[in-house]
Image (cartoon, rainbow, N blue to C red):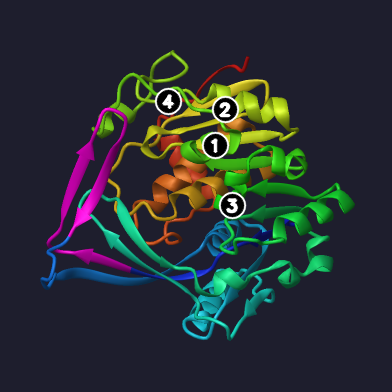
């Protein structure tokens, strides 16, 4: 059977993980919101327990993820002189086609310094670098027209014409399926601006805050919020557990105003919700200690999309995404824990993941 050919488009970064020995987490809360801050000794010398070099960026993370899922993957991204060779070599080791990784002398390869906390979350110091110069002229149009799927990730270039060029490709080639994780610019412009592309979108991936911004619609906050992981096991017959926010109205806005086929809204440790216009599904996270959350979103979307490509339904796709993300956050870096379908299926047999659903009205 011919392998499905997937193009991943977006960012490529070289990541440096740093685990500081002495740090604190400060939380400030008012009546409407709360914020957390990582604190280091101002003017002091902070001991580092661990340093790791890894790779990241939406296009490369999803590229490696789809490759491990067994697909024929081509990644389109841009790198600079510094670290660019390492980024390309890493993709090649993962059997990703690197012919369409473009080089630029205008800037360095995108670089991130990630500060990991004792809670498993992280703060990212990100330099966009060469990612800012990826543009529509870098797309190998004839080759993309032979793809089965296009996965478009966040784009660093503020006025990127890549989404518009992809829309042209999709209109010309209706057999190509499109999955999209839009960037800040598209989200701020709203659904109306991007209706034409959403009409051709097979799967839209957004987190809860992004979905609310994109649809100009608030979510309904949950009645109970708990940080204790034991509260994130959902075995209730009720559709939503008490800690999960209600995004049904946001879903309705996407489906009533566009022809998007499937919408997935993630909410970190509070689980994920997905809809195919008919039903709304909820899947909790898998309870465990997180080592590093960077790349969890890319892992989830890769696992979810792979399940759809393999012919699974939304319920199973949510499980694939959740297990893939669960594996990635158990390691440092965005790529080490990415799984194959066989590995996901094996893990699913050991995990009791309860996916609930209700009619979307």
Locate residue 257: give its quadrant. Answer: top right
Using residue 261 as the reference point, say whether residue 69 is left or right of it: left
Q: Secondary structure at mark 1?
A: helix
The picture places residue 92, in percent across and down from the top left corner, at 58, 75
- Check if mark 1's residue and mark 2's residue have beta carbons within 8 Å: yes
Of the residues tagged 4 and 1, which is closer to the observer? 1
User: Is residue 296 placed above or below 318 in the rendered structure?
Assistant: below
Q: Quadrant of the C terminus?
A: top right
- Check if mark 2's residue and mark 3's residue have beta carbons within 8 Å: no
In this figure, which residue is indicated by the disc labeled 4?
A: 245
User: Is residue 79 placed above or below 162 in the rendered structure?
Assistant: below
Q: Pick whichever of labels 1 and 2 is earlier in the sequence.
A: 1
Residue at x 58%, y 39% (from the top left corner): 214
Q: Which residues are magenta?
A: 17-39
In this figure, which residue is indicated by the disc labeled 2?
A: 250
What predominant SS class does the magenta segment belong to? strand
User: Is residue 103 placed above or below 302 in the rendered structure?
Assistant: below
Q: Pick whichever of labels 2 and 3 is earlier in the sequence.
A: 3
Q: Secondary structure at mark 2?
A: helix
In this figure, which residue is indicated by the disc labeled 1?
A: 211
Q: Residues within 10 Å of mark 2 (few under 14, many from 20)?
A: many
Q: CA distance from mark 3 to mark 1?
A: 13 Å
């Amino acid at each position: 059977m011919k392998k499905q050919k997937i193009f991943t488009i977006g960012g490529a970064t070289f990541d440096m993980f740093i685990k500081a020995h002495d740090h604190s987490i400060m939380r400030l809360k008012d009546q409407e919101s709360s914020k957390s801050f990582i604190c280091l000794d101002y003017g002091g010398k902070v001991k580092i327990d661990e340093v790791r070099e890894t790779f990241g960026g939406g296009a490369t993370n999803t590229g490696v993820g789809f490759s491990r899922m067994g697909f024929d993957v081509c990644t389109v991204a841009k790198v600079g002189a510094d670290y660019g060779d390492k980024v390309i070599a890493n993709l090649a080791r993962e059997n990703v086609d690197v012919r369409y990784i473009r080089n630029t002398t205008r800037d360095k390869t995108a670089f991130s310094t990630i500060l990991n906390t004792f809670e498993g979350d992280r703060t990212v110091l990100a330099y966009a670098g060469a990612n800012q110069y990826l543009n529509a002229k870098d797309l190998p149009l004839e080759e993309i027209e032979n793809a089965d799927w296009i996965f478009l990730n966040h784009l660093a270039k503020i006025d990127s014409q890549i989404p518009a060029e992809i829309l042209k490709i999709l209109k010309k080639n209706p057999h190509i399926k499109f999955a999209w994780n839009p960037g800040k610019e598209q989200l701020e412009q709203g659904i109306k601006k991007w209706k034409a592309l959403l009409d051709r979108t097979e799967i839209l991936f957004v987190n809860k805050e992004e979905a609310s911004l994109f649809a100009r619609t608030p979510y309904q906050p949950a009645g109970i919020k708990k940080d204790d992981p034991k509260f994130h096991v959902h075995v209730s017959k009720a559709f939503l557990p008490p800690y999960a926010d209600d995004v049904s109205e946001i879903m309705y806005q996407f489906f009533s105003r566009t022809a998007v086929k499937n919408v997935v809204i993630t909410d970190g440790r509070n689980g994920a919700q997905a809809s195919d216009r008919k039903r709304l599904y909820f899947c909790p996270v898998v309870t465990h200690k997180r080592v590093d959350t960077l790349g969890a979103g890319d892992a989830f979307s890769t696992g979810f999309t792979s399940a759809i490509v393999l012919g699974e339904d939304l319920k199973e796709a949510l499980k694939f995404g959740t297990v893939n993300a669960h594996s990635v956050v158990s390691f440092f870096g965005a790529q080490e824990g990415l799984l194959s379908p066989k590995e996901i299926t094996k893990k699913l047999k050991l995990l009791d993941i309860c996916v609930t659903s209700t009619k979307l009205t």
